[in-house]
Image (cartoon, grey):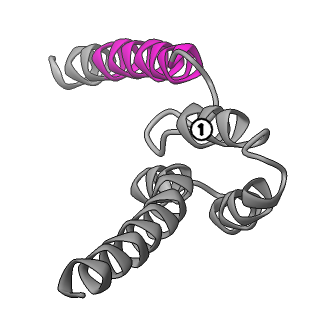
């Protein structure tokens, strides 16, 4: 008698653990999106729930979608745009330093008798 109730409890317990485990696994892409401050967090979360009803067909694509974006670099795979911007700023700074040096030289030449 006790073993019958224990087996029934065990069946329900395992069923509940598997049920909640599947839900937690489907929230992994959403958690990644939240961690990376993804602009489509809500869409990823909703699609994760839809994926539960489509026999998990969308879940791999959600994982890819969530991991493509990073806050520091956006959607790109390199920061070449930032490097180009930094190079432009560096050349502008070099030109400004050159101009300041020329103006200081002209000012020094005018002050000398």
Residue 83 image point, x, y percent: 48, 15
Picture quadrant of residue 26? bottom right
Between 37 and 30, which is closer to the camera in this rendering?
30
Q: Is residue 107 left or right of residue 72?
A: left
Q: Which residues are magenta?
A: 79-103
Report the predominant secondary structure element of the magenta stretch. helix
Q: Is residue 108 left or right of residue 84?
A: left
Taking the spot 68% from the left edge, 69% from the top edge, the residue there is 42
Residue 93 image point, x, y percent: 39, 22
Taking the spot 56% from the left edge, 17% from the top edge, the residue there is 77
Residue 36 magenta-highlighted = no
Taking the spot 65% from the left edge, 64% from the top edge, the residue there is 45
Mark 1 — residue? 63
Rate crowding at label 1 as few (under 14), some (14 to 19) or many (20 or more) other CA atoms within 10 Å. Answer: some
Between 74 and 69, which is closer to the camera in this rendering?
69
Picture quadrant of residue 76? top right
Q: Is residue 17 left or right of residue 91?
A: left
Taking the spot 55% from the left edge, 13% from the top edge, the residue there is 80
Furthest-right residue in this view:
54
Q: Is residue 16 left or right of residue 23?
A: left
* Up/down of 43 relative to 51, above or below: below
Numbered circles on residues, count:
1
């Amino acid at each position: 008698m006790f073993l019958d109730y224990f087996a029934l409890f065990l069946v329900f317990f395992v069923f509940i653990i598997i049920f909640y485990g599947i839900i937690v696994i489907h929230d992994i892409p959403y958690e990644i999106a939240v961690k990376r401050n993804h602009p489509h967090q809500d869409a990823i979360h909703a699609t994760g729930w839809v994926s539960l009803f489509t026999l998990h067909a969308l879940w791999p694509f959600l994982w890819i979608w969530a991991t493509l974006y990073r806050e520091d670099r956006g959607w790109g795979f390199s920061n070449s745009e930032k490097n180009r911007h930094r190079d432009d700023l560096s050349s502008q700074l070099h030109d400004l330093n050159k101009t300041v040096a020329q103006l200081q030289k002209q000012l020094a030449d005018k002050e000398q008798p």
